[in-house]
Image (tube, helix red, strand yellow):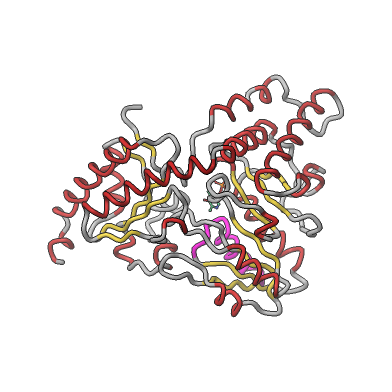
């Protein structure tokens, strides 16, 4: 590849070298099925069990509370559908937010087709779910509250502990999609009090196609992937031993340098935001203005009078990879549900770009990107009839 600057770490991250090395022996040599009763199987089972313990330790859980899945999306589906199936006799009402990732949002939409009722809580202008709104939405037939830990587009970190307390005060289970938070923010599941939590390895420099669901001990939960007796009979399917080892190695590594890495990416992000706001007019900086309340790596802007797609295309030509929002919906031309929910007008939402920094980015990356962005926005606006009419 020619000059390339990757600023899309919310979409995915490169695999850590350490995780890659740790995974390698489990493809061709120690390839045994962890469920097999021979030496190959025992080797695999040992690796899976050690990995489970590492992941549990990273989030303050017990190893018996960690269940491996094929991705973050599967963990989210399991939490929502598993609860709906397990507790559907108790009630059919679920509460979530307007700004959830499609893994939660479309799962809730699907359940609506099967007789469940879903309340999609609004958020404020910075993407925060209000504890008061949550309390008002809870009904006697509410069985689940699912609110994301940190938003993938605008970086808002939700007040999970407070929201969870409210759900529990009404006897309602609480799930959080912590896919963006895990490895980026230090948290402890026991302190948060959540019943279920989803994570995904490829968002913290682990391999793609690996996720996990934390299920609090004692919580009865219906299976989502039915099959064999894997994952203590909670999730069928032969264990992805290399993926599991890679996930655990990457998370252990991320946790060991979390504070330094977060401070470093935040310093790059802050420099970027400052320079962009100083050099480009007619823009919105989306998400929390208090940087301590947003993911350390996230910056999201709406550039008035121009299309995000055109900006992205120009940046791509200049060797810069950013995103027009969520990689999961950017194939569609609908404006982002998250941006509309925080009150960005439809037209302006179309001119939005998300930049998410990572630990391999440099100050030079930031300065070059600002330079390219300033000239791109200027050029596109010169060609924009909307800009001349303003
Ligand atoms: C990426 C992401 C997911 C999906 O995780 P996959 O492992 O890619 O399926 C879910 N929720 C959020 C907030 C994400 O950012």
Q: Give the magenta-colored segment's residue range.
A: 99-116
Q: Is residue 224 left or right of residue 259?
A: right
User: Residue 339: image x %, image y %?
Assistant: 40, 63
Based on the displayed image, in which of its 4 quarters is residue 52 positioned? top right
Query: Image quadrant of residue 42?
Result: top right
Indicate the quadrant where residue 104 lies: bottom right
Please name the residue shown 79% across and 55% down the image. 217
Prevalent SS, magenta region: helix
- Magenta-colored stretch includes residue 195: no
Q: Residue at x 49, y 63 (%)?
A: 99
Q: Position of residue 27 (x, y in %)?
A: 66, 24
Q: Is residue 36 left or right of residue 50?
A: right
**Where 342 falls versus 381 (above or below)?**
below
**Does residue 206 lie above or below 164 as drawn?**
above
Q: Position of residue 75 (x, y in %)?
A: 65, 51
- Residue 344, position as x, y percentages in the image: 35, 66
Q: Nearer the viewer, residue 358 or 116?
A: 358
Q: Work out whether 138 lies above or below 111.
A: below
Q: Is residue 128 left or right of residue 212?
A: left
Q: Residue at x 55, y 64 (%)?
A: 159
Q: Residue at the location (76% across, 47% down)? A: 62
Looking at the rendering, in which quadrant would you find the N terminus? top left
**Residue 103, magenta (yes or no):** yes
Image quadrant for the C terminus? bottom left
């Amino acid at each position: 590849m020619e000059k390339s600057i990757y600023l899309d770490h919310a979409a995915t991250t490169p695999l850590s070298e350490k995780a890659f090395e740790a995974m390698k022996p489990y493809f061709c040599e120690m390839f045994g099925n962890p469920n097999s009763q021979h030496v190959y199987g025992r080797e695999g089972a040992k690796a899976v069990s050690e990995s489970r313990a590492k992941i549990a330790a990273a989030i303050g859980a017990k190893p018996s509370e960690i269940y491996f899945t094929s991705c973050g999306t599967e963990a989210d589906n399991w939490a929502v559908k598993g609860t709906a199936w397990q507790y559907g006799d108790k009630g059919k009402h679920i509460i979530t937010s307007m700004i959830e990732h499609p893994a939660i949002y479309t799962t809730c939409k699907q359940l609506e087709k099967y007789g469940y009722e879903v309340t999609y809580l609004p958020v404020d202008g910075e993407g925060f779910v209000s504890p008061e709104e949550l309390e008002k939405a809870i009904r006697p037939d509410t069985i689940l509250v699912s609110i994301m830990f940190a938003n993938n587009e605008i970086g808002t970190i939700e007040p999970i502990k407070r929201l969870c307390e409210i759900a529990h005060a009404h006897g309602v289970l609480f799930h959080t999609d912590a896919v963006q938070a895990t490895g980026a923010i230090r948290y402890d599941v026991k302190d948060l009090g959540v019943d279920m939590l989803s994570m995904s390895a490829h968002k913290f420099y682990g391999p793609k196609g690996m996720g996990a669901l934390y299920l609090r001990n004692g919580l009865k939960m219906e299976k989502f992937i039915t099959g064999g007796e894997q994952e203590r009979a909670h999730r069928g399917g032969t264990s992805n031993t290399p993926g599991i080892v890679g996930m655990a190695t990457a998370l252990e590594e991320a946790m060991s340098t979390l504070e330094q890495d977060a401070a470093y990416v935040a310093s790059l992000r802050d420099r970027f935001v400052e320079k962009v706001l100083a050099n480009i007019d007619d823009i919105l900086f989306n998400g929390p203005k208090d940087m301590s309340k947003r993911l350390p790596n996230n910056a999201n802007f709406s550039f008035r009078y121009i299309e995000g797609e055109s900006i992205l295309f120009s940046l791509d030509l200049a060797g810069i990879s950013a995103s027009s929002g969520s990689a999961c919906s950017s194939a569609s031309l609908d404006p982002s549900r998250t941006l509309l929910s925080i009150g960005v007008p439809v037209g302006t939402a179309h001119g939005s770009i998300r930049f998410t920094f990572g630990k391999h980015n440099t100050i030079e990356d930031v300065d070059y990107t600002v330079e390219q962005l300033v000239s791109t926005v200027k050029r596109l606006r010169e060609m924009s009839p909307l800009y001349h009419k303003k």
